[in-house]
Amino acid sequence: MPEQILQSTLLQELEDSLISRNIRAGFALLDDAFGHGQALDYRDPDAIAILLCLAQWTDLGYRDIAFLDVCLAGFPENERVQLRFLDFLRLRLVEAFRALAREDLDRAISLLDIVLRAGEGLLPTHLVFVANFWMGRALRKKGEYELALFHITAARATAQNANAPKLVAVTKIHESWLVFQKGERRHALDLLDEAEAELRVTGHALSLGNIESARGRFIRRSGDYALALEHFERAIAIYSETHANHPNLARALVNAAYVKRLIALDMQAQWKSDHVRGAVHAEYLLILREALQLLRKARDIYALHQHQGGTGSVLVNAGHLHLESGEIDEAFTEAGKAFALGQERHDVILMARSRILQAAVELAHVDEELGESPNAALHAHRAVQYADEAIELAQHTQNRRLLAEAYLARGSAAADFFPPEWETARDYASKAAALLTEEDRDHLATELSRLKAKILRSTGIDQTLRLWSDGQLGNKSFQQIQEEFAELVIPKVWNSVGKNVTLVAQKLSISPKKIRRILRNTGFMDGSRKKP
């Protein structure tokens, strides 16, 4: 049997290192205690507390979840009923982390809810922090952002009251993403800067890599893809130094591949508009191949951890790359696999993303057949069906961009229907626009402007104004009508005054900010590549 370890001082030293984020010291303690086959002695009164420490250190990158499972397997089942109440809560926390790591989010949330309710007023400060911190992360993964922010804020307040600045900094990384979802990009970036300033001295690769990766995602949304890619590449380098097979590295690889895809899409639009082929097209194909290579690396890492959510993300991104390379059948296959994984895990975000891809695949079939085949109508119907399902799934989350993307898929399906349903397309374009903010200057803003331009070209301004004058407003509110009217008028005035925003603002008594937003939304002004 493995040699049993002495546990008298280990617990305090591990907890102190956790609070101070002294990663090197903590890993050294763990190697000394568990590096040679030693096992937890569950007869020791501190055994469950140490097990919870091991869960937290696993979260920080020490070994992997399989190591924690081995430690937990040594705990006799018949002794669980004899646990002290506080140890019972500690054990629930360990099980909650295992569920979180295994992507069983519903179980993790249920267990953490038990701990927070049953332990109210009884839990030590550091356990209050852990329970809220893990709860916030689990809820964020499910797309329940408001409740996630509540728990992350509670974790941060607990850390502040305990005078634990490193723990406060860790919560800021997660808080930054949640405030970013509310459209507060500047605040989100400031939180990351504050977290990095505090955690830089720890040298903790996972935290520092997470900060760079988050920056990449925030900047990507501003449309500055080159700068976003730099941050993802830095994150990849940081993770790779000490955690060559960590799921966070795989996530950064997927994000880098996603940005490369968006760069390629911009290039594709350039050569289509300029009728330029040759070198530009060759570079486009090279970028797509590089993106697929990054996804293959990510897939291999996720496979090591049996990380189904990550694998699903790889499949969706690979599907889009295949679709944009003209490989429609491959895209269809990847989308189907991703949706099946989402169903298996009850992951509505993955399921919605898969349905959006499937809708795009069906519309690609419509374009391919040029409306001449009876199958074209069938593909158009399927695109509508998939987009409708994506909307329904996205509405079960608080991910407004996911819902906006689903609305755009539905609007595109309406525009390519037989016959085209322009009023429906316009309605969904308006719904998508209502969810996007001034900060959204990436591919979603581009897709929105293209859809609106397509609708306008096909329906004409005269027809739109004639319908409005007859009182045929559809289901639009007066505010939506005002917005659409502004999108018709402002570009015309902008062109007539020499494309001068200031003159338009003076002529129409509208703020320059609104004018720029309208021009971006309608594709007349490219503000999507400005640096933040």
Image: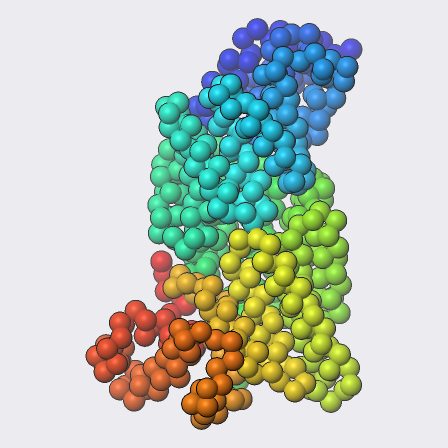
Colour mapping: rainbow
In the image, 237: left or right of 176? Answer: right
Residue at the image point whose x is 41% and y is 55% from the top = 183
Give the x, y percent position of residue 305: 69, 39
Which of the 4 image quarters holds residue 53?
A: top right
Q: How many marks?
A: 0
Residue at the front extreme? 471
In the image, 380: left or right of 441? Answer: right
Which of the 4 image quarters holds residue 416?
A: bottom right
Which of the 4 image quarters holds residue 248?
A: top right
User: Can I make out residue 406 in this image?
Assistant: yes
Closest to the observer, 241 or 158: 158
Give the x, y percent position of residue 512: 27, 72
Residue at the image point whose x is 61% and y is 15% from the top = 85
Quarter of the picture containing the C terminus is bottom left
Closest to the observer, 186 or 465: 465
Give the x, y percent position of residue 126: 48, 22
Quarter of the picture containing the N terminus is top right
Residue at the left extreme? 506
Vertical side of 518 occupied by 459: above or below:
below
Give the x, y percent position of residue 454: 52, 83
Residue at the image point whose x is 76% and y is 87% from the top = 373
User: Can I make out residue 277 in this image?
Assistant: no
Vertical side of 224 occupied by 214: above or below:
above
